[in-house]
Amino acid sequence: MAKIVKIQFQTAGRLYDFRTGDLDITIEERVIVETERGKSIGLVVKGPFEIDDRDVPEGLKTVLRKAVPEDLESAARHRAKEKDAFDLCLRRIRERGMEMKLVKVEYLFDGSKAIFYFTADGRIDFRELVKDLAHAFHTRIEMRQIGVRDEAGMVGGLGICGRELCCSSFLREFEPVSVKMAKEQNLALNPTKISGQCGRLLCCLAYEFETYCTLRKCLPKCGKRVSCGSVEGEVVKLNILDGTVTVKTDDNHEVIVRGDEVKVESTPERPKKPAKDSEETKPKKPQRGQQRTQPGRPVKERDENRDNAARTKEKP
């Protein structure tokens, strides 16, 4: 059996699995691990738990060691250098008039590389900018373009609900969100009310979408004729969470009734459209080379009239 822990490298970031090895690791401990970018310091958020050796992914790395106070002091120094790097890079961007927005600067644990996160509408030629930054900080520089959702998660802030943004507090993965989710929850399709700080649809629209779909199945649709005791009329409004419907009666009165107490009236069948003419009654089109005749007029009579007209034209 192998012991596994899940580690995050930033708040609400993606979780990565690592072997514990011979270390006795607990939750909320900081550890040093080897990643594709080099050594990094991470926070244990889940585990340790055991899984079968056959289920362990190939190439899964092992935690190097627990973080010591010197490691935490080094990380704090890098956090201070990130602020200086951010200010300098922002000045260079403004001096060069580059159409890009700097979001965040991150130093690796050992200080061997600085990563500059930015957003832009298209491709940016930042070769000269990288030269300036490398000359100023004497380390490797990486420019990484991100999307607006990732920007909101890095910057953070408060949503229209008054709480901290989900993407910067606990939401680790972005789920697809559509306008259909807002319609199903009877929300006003106002872009300012259903859009988040990033300008995209609110991630929280997906939280209760399945619940609304389940509750709506127990209620009649708007426009249906229903009856509930002595009340008969047309459904004009649904309150999905309360499980009630608003019925408009024939005398233009609105009554709120329980959705599980209404009975949907059967709609009368629509009159069927008259069947089209059958092939037997349709006049058949003449085939190529076949003479067309008017109904009730013999072919011989038409030919005689044509001959008389031709003789009349021959007279001087």
Image (cartoon, rainbow, N blue to C red):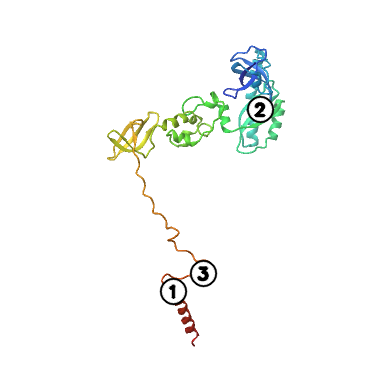
Which residue was labeled with disc 2? 115
Sooner in the amino-acid sequence: mark 3 or mark 1? 3
Dot 3, crowdedness within 10 Å: few (<14), some or many (≥20)?
Answer: few
Depth order, front residue of 154/217:
217
Sooner in the amino-acid sequence: mark 2 or mark 3? 2
Please name the residue shown 69% across and 28% down the image.
141
Q: Secondary structure at mark 2?
A: strand
The residue type indicated by label 1 comes to Pro
Dot 2, crowdedness within 10 Å: few (<14), some or many (≥20)?
Answer: some
Which residue was labeled with disc 3? 290
Which numbered disc covers residue 298?
1
Mark 1 or 2: in front is 1
Q: Secondary structure at mark 3?
A: loop
Depth order, front residue of 106/233:
233
Q: Seen in the image, is 285 located left or right of residue 72?
A: left
Q: Secondary structure at mark 1?
A: loop
The image quarter in which residue 19 lies: top right
Q: Where is residue 9 drawn, in percent x and y?
A: 62, 22
